[in-house]
Amino acid sequence: MRHIERYLQTFTTLQPDGLAVLADIFAADARFKDPFNDVRGVEAITRVFAHMYATTRDSRFVVQAWAVNGETLFIRWDYHFQTLKGEPWQIPGTSVVRFNAAGLALEHVDYWDPAEHVYSKLPVLGWLMHWLRGKLATPQ
């Protein structure tokens, strides 16, 4: 269980100038997937987080709950950040992380809704998303 605690600690304390710690929790050929990325390898995973920090301010992950089943970790989190214009955002999500026998992450897959939390906040796309939801929703 030490590797689970280390993994959670890394993500709740991750800083833009400390991304080298990702090499301590991911296997060399690990996969990271979220709604915008599907990459393999520690170097590529590090680039994903470097890009996140370059395009946001005050980014942090807050773990709300977690559970373990065998070598799989389930994490319920909230991602807090500010846009480069200073607007505060919060995105709730879930991650499923599989570990190898050495306690390194083999695969980290994030599940969150980009339609609700990103696309709907963009001017033209937001209007379209609202219209589509209205068309697809069950009538009341």
Image (cartoon, rainbow, N blue to C red):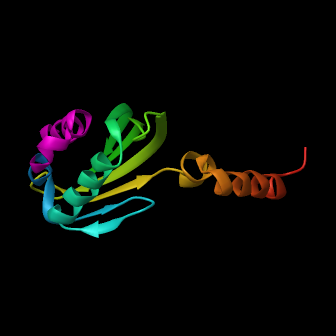
Give the x, y percent position of residue 43: 15, 63
Residue 16 visible here: yes
Q: Residue at x 21, y 65 (%)?
A: 44
Instruction: Tell me which residue sits at (43%, 33%) in the image.
Output: 86
Q: Residue furthest front?
A: 85
User: Quadrant location of residue 33?
Assistant: bottom left
Confirm whether the magenta stretch covers residue 8.
Answer: yes
Closer to the camera in the image, 43 or 121 = 121
Quadrant housing the N terminus: top left
Q: Which residues are magenta?
A: 1-20
Above/below status of 64 relative to 41: above
Tell me if I can see residue 80 in this picture.
no
Q: Measuring from the top left, give residue 110's x and y in whole percent.
A: 40, 53
**Image-based side of 76 in relation to 51, left or right:** right
Our reading of the magenta stretch's main secondary structure is helix
Q: Which one is in front, 69 or 84?
A: 84
Q: Residue at x 53, y 53 (%)?
A: 114
Q: Nearer the viewer, residue 118 or 24?
A: 118
The spot of residue 18 in percent (x, y) is: 12, 42
Quarter holding residue 140: top right
Left/right placement of residue 74 relative to residue 41 reads right
Determine if the magenta segment contains residue 16: yes
Q: Is residue 80 left or right of residue 9?
A: right
Q: Residue 113, percent across and down?
A: 54, 51
